[in-house]
Amino acid sequence: MVLVFNAKKRLTLSAGVAAGIAALLEGCSSTPMAPAPEAGPAAPAGSPASTPVMPAAPAVVNASMPPPAPREFRAAWVSTVANIDWPSRSNLGMARQQAEALAILDRARALNLNAIVLQVRPSADAIYPSTLEPWSEFLTGQQGRPPAQAWDPLQFWIEQAHARGLELHAWFNPYRARHATARSPLAANHIGRTRPEVVKPYGRYLWMDPGEAAASQHTLDVVLDVVRRYDIDGVHIDDYFYPYPIDTPNAAGPEGVALDGGVGAKQELEFPDQASWQRYLLGGGTLDRAHWRRQNVNSLIEAMYLGIRKEKSWVRFGISPFGIGRPDRRPAGIMGFSQYDKLYADAELWLANGWLDYLAPQLYWPVSQAPQAFDVLLDYWLAQNTRARHVWPGLYTSRIDNSAKAFAPEEIVKQIGVTRSRSGVRGHLHFSIAALMENRKGIADQLKSQAYQTAALTPATPWLGAEAPAAPQAAARRESNGVALKLSAGAGRPVAHYAIWSRYGAEWRFAVAPASRPVLLLADDAAGGAAQSVVVSAVDRLGNESERINVYTRS
C-alpha cells in the first residue's frame, strides 16, 4: 500500500492509483480489540529464527483479527560530506536544496523505508544554524558562510520526514575536524581556530584528539545542543573514532584498504597524540597507549548515551562501527582490519554495557566472501549483544556500481534475507541513498517487489519505555471511491503514527500514517474491491502500540 500526499494535506492509502478524498463525517462507532502481541523473546544470540521476521507477502488470516504489525528498521544514510548524497553540490540555492531533499524523502517513502540517517556534522561543522560550529562548506560552498536565504536545513528535513511517516536520525562525525576534500579555509569559530591545541593534522585531514578532554566535551556539547533544539528521533555516530591509519603525511584515510581485508597502511603513521599521552602518564595514568586510546573513546560514548537519556528519553542512540570485531573474539576464518586495534573502538564493550540503543555494524562484504562473510559477522555481533539492544547491520548498497568488485542487486536482497532469518536483528541500513535514488541495476525495483512489499513499523525499544499509548479515536464513512477515515490520538502519551489494517476479501493489508496527517482515504482497489474491514492502532515514538480499534466493518 502507498501513502500519497495531496494538496489538502490529506492522505490516500491505496493498493493502486490514488483517489481523491471527500469530506469526512463523524459518527461511526469504534470497537476495541486486544493488540496483537509483539514477537516473543529473542532466540539466543546468533541463532536462526524458525520463521522470517517479516512476511514475504500480506498475510491471509481470519476475518476478525489482523496479523501483528510488520516490524523492521529500514533506513538509508544520507551523506553530506563531499556532497555524496545531499546536496548534489555545494552552494545551491535554497529551492534546489529543498527539492533534492524532498526527492530523497519521497523515494524513501515510496520504497517503504521508515527512517533516514542524515549527516548533520561532517567535519566539526554544521548543516544547521549553530553557535558552536560553523556552517558546512558542503552546504554553502564556504565554511562559516550562511545560506544566501535564511533557512534551517535540519528543521526542514525533520518536518518533511515526519510528514511522510519517516524517522530522522541526526548523524554526527565525532572527531573529524576537516575532510580531505575540503577547499575553503577554516572559519573563525571552527574548533581548529578556537582551540588549535586539541586539533591535530593527520594526512590530508584535521582530527580532534580524543585524548584531549576539551575535544570530547566539544563534541558532546554539539550533540546535546541538537538533541535539545530539534525534534530528532535518534543520534547516530559513525566509524571515525581515531582515524584510519595512513602511511604518509599526504595521504587520505585508507578505508578502502580496510574494506578489502587489509590491516591498514603498510607503515602506519602514528597519530600525533604525544602531548595528551604524556600528560596522562604524568598524571599517574597506568594504561598502555592502546587501552588509553580506547578509554578516551569509551568515555565519550558513555557520556553521550547518558546525556541523551537525560535530555530526551525517547531519542535513540545508534553507532555504526566498522564491521569486523576484536581479533581475540572473532569466529574462525574471519580476517581483516581491526577497529579495536586501529580505530580504538571497543564496540563489544558498548554493547555489553548498554551504552547504545542500536548497533549498525558496517557489514560491507558479500555472503560468499569467507574471510569477511556477511552472515558470519552478523552472528558474531548478535553473540556480543548480551543486553538485547537492537542490531541493525549496515549494507553496502552503493557497491552496486561498475567497479571490479561490484555487488549485484541480488546480493543486497540476499543479505536482507539473512537479517530476517535471525530473530535478534529486525532491521538494516543502506549505505547510501544514492544507489536507491539512481536505482542502480534495478536495486530499488527489486527491493520494492521482493523485500519491501508492505510498510513496516520500527521495532519497539522497551528499555527506554514500554507504556503503550491510549487507543486512538476514529471515525469512518463509506464514500463513493473508498473508506474515509479521520483519526486522533487518545488522552495521555503522544502518538507518532497510526497503524492501519484494511481487509480486502481474505487478505489484510497494512499501512502506516503519520499522526500529523490523520485524514485519509482507503481507496477501492481494482482487484480487491472495497475494504470490508478497517482496524487501527496508535504507535508512540518508541514503537509501543495501543490496543486496536475496529473502525469500520462493511455491512
Image: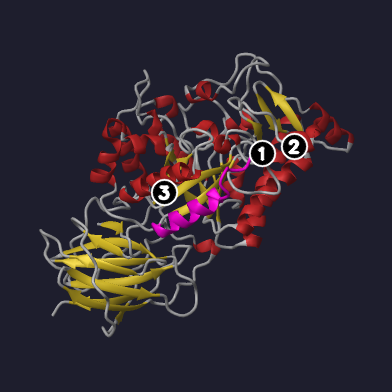
* Kind of residue sitting beneath label 1: Gly
Q: State which quadrant residue 480 falls in.
A: bottom left
Place of residue 210 in the rendered image (x, y in percent of width and height, measured from the top left): 72, 37
Ranked by sequence position, the earlier of labels 2 and 3 is 2
Q: State which quadrant residue 299 falls in.
A: top right
Horizontal relation, residue 41 to residue 236: left or right: left
Q: Residue at x 81, y 32 (%)?
A: 197
Badge 3 is on which residue?
425
- Residue 56 vs 441, above or below: the answer is below
Q: Are marks 2 and 1 in contact (CB under 8 Å)?
A: yes
Magenta stretch: residue 145 in it? yes
Q: Secondary structure at mark 2?
A: loop
- Residue 332 vs 116, above or below: the answer is above
Tell me, for residue 240, which label it has, or none.
none
Q: CA distance from mark 1 to mark 3?
A: 41 Å
Q: CA distance from mark 2 to mark 3?
A: 44 Å
Q: Nearer the viewer, mark 2 or mark 3?
A: 2
Classed neighbour count for the residue bearing mark 1: other residues with Cα under 10 Å, few (<14), some (14–19), many (≥20): many
Badge 1 is on which residue?
144
For the residue pair 540 and 161, the one nearer the viewer reads as: 161
Place of residue 342 in the rendered image (x, y in percent of width and height, measured from the top left): 63, 28
Place of residue 543 in the rendered image (x, y in percent of width and height, measured from the top left): 44, 63
Ranked by sequence position, the earlier of labels 2 and 1 is 1
Magenta stretch: residue 496 in it? no
Magenta-drawn segment: 144-165
Horizontal relation, residue 442 to residue 256: left or right: left
For the residue pair 210 and 350, the one nearer the viewer reads as: 210
Q: Is residue 268 visible?
A: yes
Badge 2 is on which residue?
188
Q: Quadrant of the N terminus?
A: bottom left
Q: Nearer the viewer, mark 1 or mark 3?
A: 1
